Image (cartoon, rainbow, N blue to C red):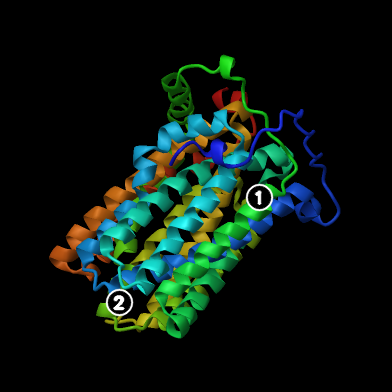
Amino acid sequence: MTVEPPAASGADTGAPPAEPEPATRLRGGLLRHHDFRQLFLADSLSQFGTQLSMLALPVLAVRVLDATPFQMGLLGTCEFLAFLVIGLPAGAWVDRWRKQRVLVFNDLVRGLALATLPLAWALDALTFGQMLLVALVVGCCTVFFDVAYQSYLPDIVEPDDIGEGNAKLQAVQSVAMIGGPAAGGGLIKLIGSPLTVGLDALTFVWSAFWVRRIQHVDTPPRREDRRPLAVEIREGLSFVLRNPLLWRITACTGTANFFSSMTGAMLVIFALNNLHLDPGHLGLAMGIGAAGGLLGALTTPRVNNLVGEGRTIPLASLGWIPAQALMPLAGTVIPPMVALTLSSFVVTFVVVVYNVTQVSFRQRLCPRPLLGRMNASIRFIVWGTMPIGAFIGGVVGEAVGARNVFWIGVVGAAISAIPVVFSPLIRMRDLPKELDRLSA
């Protein structure tokens, strides 16, 4: 897995919007493109910091506040609840605002919210309730940031460059997934989880700085041209649900996220309390395993060329099943570090290949004015399942133990693959690039 962002992101000078920078293919690729480079740098900082806090926050809850499995489920629920509650209207709002302002504002609010945790810890006033509140605030900001972020990329690059742009941004995320947890585990041992969260807060401030340097100015529709919010929300949701391929991809992703959020809520407490690993070892396993994501980002174009863009999606979804099966075997027939590392490697590889392929497809398929609502509609469905999954994971983990939650996750991985494996995607080499081709 928030007030109106534009009001806090800088004043409108009234000057005519600058012409967007031509997104022509440059020697050296998109990194030679000024606006994409700023987005790339912002994403690098934000992703690395996020990976720090993804380990530091649950460790803080378990080690400092002695959180139970049920409380860890609540923390995961609060983290993703905003996608379920405000996910749909967020897309319509983003389509009405300047996306750069949305990105800057929500970066700054996330940084400020996270900074309150080490401050409260230093004052000996940190509570689990505060952690839940911070998770809610950060989750709300993430909803707006992610919707605006995915809708902004097609604004600043040419349609033919969207795939390259997504692959580079996924590579950033993969590198952060490698270095972030490993660095996070080391920092937690060195300075503690509260101060590690404080470092994450600073990365969001730096991210806002780089986003602010983007020269492209998108022009939102005039106020008098806007239609009722409910009408615009229905358009975005209808585009997704009536599309014969998009709804299958959305069903697959939403189901996978439901079960992965169940296991994700239990990961840290399972590793620390059941497998008796320390945060450093857990971070190292997650970091090494995340190299699979980097491999996936670098090889997705080749995978698409080899097996076909359409077939890549169902085949990648099948790869989740054996990877999930490694986790409940950790500490029994498979050494804990081997199970965690190998499972993380395979999962991140197939997830990145899957995401680069399907996100690029839907970005080029969707009409530009509908991008924010389309992305928000998909996020509402696929991330809206996550707070429910995290809560159920906490309840089940409290009742039958964290290990059994991971066995449920194996079954869930198989169920999630059904919508795309038994679909036209398995027979398609090339995915449509235009809406009329898809409906023909």
Expressed as whole percent of the image width and height from the top left, the position of residue 109 reads: 49, 51
Report whether 110 appears left or right of 66.
right
Work out whether residue 226 or residue 6 is closer to the camera in this orientation and state it.
Answer: 6
Q: Quadrant of residue 298?
A: bottom right
User: Is residue 301 something that shows in the picture?
Assistant: no
Name the residue at the right extreme.
27
Q: Amino acid at mark 2?
A: Arg
Q: Amino acid at mark 1?
A: Val
Residue drawn 67% across the image and 58% down it: 41
Residue drawn 24% across the image and 69% down it: 67
Q: Which residue is mark 2?
A: 63
Q: Residue 99 has which mark?
A: none
User: Is residue 219 something that shows in the picture?
Assistant: yes
**Quadrant of the snapshot with the C terminus:** top right
Report whether 96 appears left or right of 231.
right
Work out whether residue 138 or residue 437 is closer to the camera in this orientation and state it.
Answer: 138
Between discs 1 and 2, the one toward the N terminus:
2
Residue drawn 41% across the image and 72% down it: 194
Expressed as whole percent of the image width and height from the top left, the position of residue 48 reads: 56, 65
Q: Quadrant of residue 54?
A: bottom left
Q: Quadrant of residue 367?
A: top right
Work out whether residue 216 or residue 253 is closer to the camera in this orientation and state it.
Answer: 216
Q: Residue 211 has which mark?
A: 1
